[in-house]
Amino acid sequence: MTALPTDQAITDLLTSGLKACGVEASVLNAGPGAPASLPARSPITGQSLGTLAADTKESAAEKIAAAAEAFADWRDVPAPARGQLVQRWGQLLGEHKEDLAKIITVEAGKTPSEAAGEVQEMIDVCEFALGQSRQLWGKTMPSERPGHKLMETWHPLGVVGVISAFNFPVAVYSWNTALALVAGDAVVWKPSENAVLAALGAQSLLAQAAAEVGAPEGLVPVLVGGRDIGDAMVRDERVALVSATGSVRMGREVGPVVAERFGRVLLELGGNNGAIVAPSADIDLALRGVVFAAAGTAGQRCTTLRRLIVHESIADDFVDKIVAAYKTLSIGSPTEDGVLVGPLINEGSYDAMQAALKQAESEGGTVLCGGGRVLDDDRPEAHYVEPAVVRMPAQTAVMESETFAPILYVVTYSDLDEALEIHNGVPQGLSSAIFTSELAESEKFLSRSDCGIANVNIGTSGAEIGGAFGGEKETGGGRESGTDSWKAYMRQATNTVNYSGELPLAQGVEFL
Ligand code: NAD
């Protein structure tokens, strides 16, 4: 643990990142005259970064209207030409990888390596989407009628609304946007109120790319604001698809509103991820996989490992090793070299963590390490914690919901069926893992894990953009990025073309 940086050091880091991405630092100077405003702060020091002018419901509606107009032009641009926009965006992100990463570090508290990894993910998905722009293919199939052609074709959907969470402030936007743009859609983005600056940085680079390739104005606006502005977008009938990433609570609010107006929804909600460690596991590898997945990003990934299910024959020894490894983790400002665990996003997260630990103890759990606050003498407004390991007698109520903080609950099992039952016995279904050297165990796990992501001999976090990302049950069922996800941003039509000169009806029906 080292001392936290000064306010000035954080401001300098932010300003250099913003400037290089084409965002004026003056965006943080919204005065009392602004119709709406939003505070910005850094979790590293807890300091205020300034105040942003925010959208009102009226200005949000205007941006959505402009996006709908831009869509009318953009859908007629050939898809491979639309690919040029994401290609250029990817190039600009490559040139400004470190600049955008600086803003992410300041605003979300990620280490430079993780922040740069997030930008790399954006670059990767731009490359992926460029390729996809030549592969928006439909199918043709034999018609039952002579002289007829039958085919399925894909068409641009409309305006896509993206809602994103603080912990992946820009990558999730790019998963949606890169594919939606090649699909021919306009994209309106309501980023997290805790990470607007990173959003402005990413969007500024996209706006630059859009201007360079001559894309219509208003195609990719950002709505600055909190839940109320997100809600206004969700209710807007011009938004054909709402792709929303965040907590299960948010999904429960957004899903029914979109369903009521028969809009489409893509939900990427909270996880409560489990890993099984079998007796045959390579213990050193499992240890590294578990510690990264559980304590990395200070437990603030949707894919963070929260439930460890260890075979009873190796549990004591394995848990000792985890506790020993946790004691070596360096906690502090992500701006310092060697720091692996940065801050929690805010006081609310800290309070939720303390409440969960208390509940775990009341349900028979024993806190083996961590949970305490550190560096609070230095900066009381910043919230740093030691990642916690809690041994539980069984999977109890506290383990059934996601606490967005670094708590790893450990339970034991005696046979794989029991482990799978524990594993699947929570309402969420995002990511899962097994550590084993036995083929039969790994195959059984892959077919029985009820999650959208199931891994063998790697942890629950750290997905690649090539495979579809998303989860089942309360995680919402959405899929982003990966092979088939482009279809979510398009509408499918079935076309029958009759070149026979006759009018035979399907199923042999006679009429006239
Ligand atoms: P959050 O639910 O508080 O907010 C997420 C976004 O939803 C924000 O932009 C917020 O303004 C908006 N929002 C909230 N209520 C809304 C409403 N009623 N209408 C419209 N918009 C609304 O989540 P958070 O604290 O920013 O992020 C952490 C959560 O996100 C965790 O639960 C985490 O697991 C989840 N998450 C999931 C994924 C995934 O891909 N499954 C990825 C990242 C984060």
Image (cartoon, helix red, strand yellow):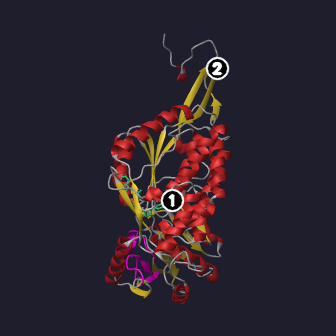
- Residue at the (52%, 55%) spot, across then down: 23
In terms of secondary structure, where does tag 1 sit? helix
Residue type for callout 2: Pro
Q: Is residue 105 visible?
A: no
Q: Which residue is mark 1?
A: 198
For badge 1, the amino acid type reads Ala
To which residue does mark 2 refer? 146
Q: Which mark is residue 363?
A: none
Which of the 4 quarters of the picture holds residue 182?
top right
285 versus 481 height, above or below = below
Point out the tag, 2 or 1, that comes first from the N-terminus.
2
Residue at the top extreme? 512
Query: Would you call the spot at circle 1 few (<14 residues within 10 Å), some (14-19), or many (20 or more)?
Result: many
Residue 313, x across and y down, in percent:
54, 87
Q: Nearer the viewer, residue 320 or 395?
A: 320
Badge 2: few (under 14), some or many (20 or more) residues near its Cα, within 10 Å? few
Residue 287 lies, in percent from the top left, at 59, 81
Answer whether residue 383 is magenta in the image: yes
Looking at the rendering, which quadrant does residue 62 occupy?
A: top left
438 on left or right of 254: right
x 60%, y 65%: residue: 116
Q: Is residue 484 left or right of residue 362?
A: right
Query: Is the magenta region chiefly helix, strand or loop?
Result: loop
Q: Which residues are magenta?
A: 378-406
Foreground of the two, 412 or 486: 486
